[in-house]
């Protein structure tokens, strides 16, 4: 799995302070043009979860900022939650979801491993599994996804 620093993602520095200022974490930001219109996909999360009102709040805050940064009003902005079983697109997402239950495909054993994210760096993630805490380098993870709504405390 590849680690791409969030700061290297186009327009991340323009959007992240606004999103975190509202009490959310920016999970994914994708900005592209299609038929001369800007399309922006934003995925947010928070420890309390994300609902429609949360997405609407972030959308209202980000739209004027994106219009100014992209110098266009021809824009489609979509703000969503990560969903219950989000498939990780970037290894940097491990840090965002610390404390959450995940499943990773460990290439060393060619099988899924479940655990709670203890911490993450630019090189690896530490999971609390049934066998204790283990370090998984991103080079040994083929895929990863959230495993439902269970947290480290076992709440739903």
Image: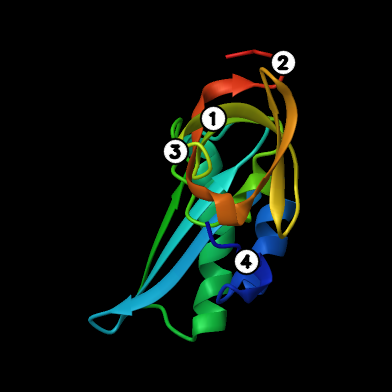
- Is label 4 or label 2 in front? 2
- Characterize the local packing of mark 1: few (<14), some (14-19) or many (20 or more) Cα atoms within 10 angstroms: some
Disc 3, SS: loop
Between 115 and 8, the one lying in front of the other is 115
**Contact (CB < 8 A) between labels 4 and 2?**
no
Disc 1, SS: strand
Residue that numbered label 1 is attached to: 113
**Image coords of residue 137 (percent x, y):** 66, 51
Disc 2, SS: loop
- Is label 4 or label 3 in front? 3
**Image coords of residue 11 (percent x, y):** 58, 75
Decide which of tag 4 and tag 2 comes sooner along the chain: 4
Left or right of residue 14: residue 75 = left
Residue 91 in sight: no
Residue that numbered label 2 is attached to: 153
- Is label 3 or label 2 in front? 3
- Characterize the local packing of mark 3: few (<14), some (14-19) or many (20 or more) Cα atoms within 10 angstroms: few
- Quote the CA–CA distance across marks 3 and 1: 10 Å
Residue 48 in which image quadrant? top right
In the displayed structure, 110 sits above or below 69; it is above
Q: Residue at x 70, y 51 (%)?
A: 124
Decide which of tag 2 and tag 1 comes sooner along the chain: 1
Residue 38 in which image quadrant? bottom left
- Characterize the local packing of mark 2: few (<14), some (14-19) or many (20 or more) Cα atoms within 10 angstroms: few
**Image coords of residue 17 (percent x, y):** 72, 62
Label of residue 15 in the image: 4
Residue that numbered label 3 is attached to: 110
- Quote the CA–CA distance across marks 2 and 1: 18 Å
């Amino acid at each position: 799995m590849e680690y791409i620093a969030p700061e290297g993602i186009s327009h991340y520095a323009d959007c992240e302070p606004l999103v975190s200022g509202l009490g959310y974490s920016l999970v994914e930001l994708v900005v592209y043009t299609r038929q001369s219109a800007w399309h922006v996909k934003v995925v947010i999360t928070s420890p309390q979860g994300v609902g429609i009102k949360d997405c609407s709040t972030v959308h209202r805050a980000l739209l004027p900022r994106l219009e100014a940064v992209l110098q266009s009003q021809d824009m489609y902005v979509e703000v969503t939650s990560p969903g219950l079983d989000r498939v990780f697109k970037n290894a940097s997402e491990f840090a965002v979801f610390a404390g959450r239950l995940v499943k990773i495909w460990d290439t060393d054993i060619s099988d899924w491993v479940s655990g709670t994210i203890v911490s993450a760096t630019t090189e690896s993630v530490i999971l609390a599994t049934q066998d204790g805490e283990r370090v998984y380098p991103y080079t040994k993870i083929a895929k990863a996804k959230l495993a439902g709504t269970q947290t480290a405390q076992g709440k739903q």
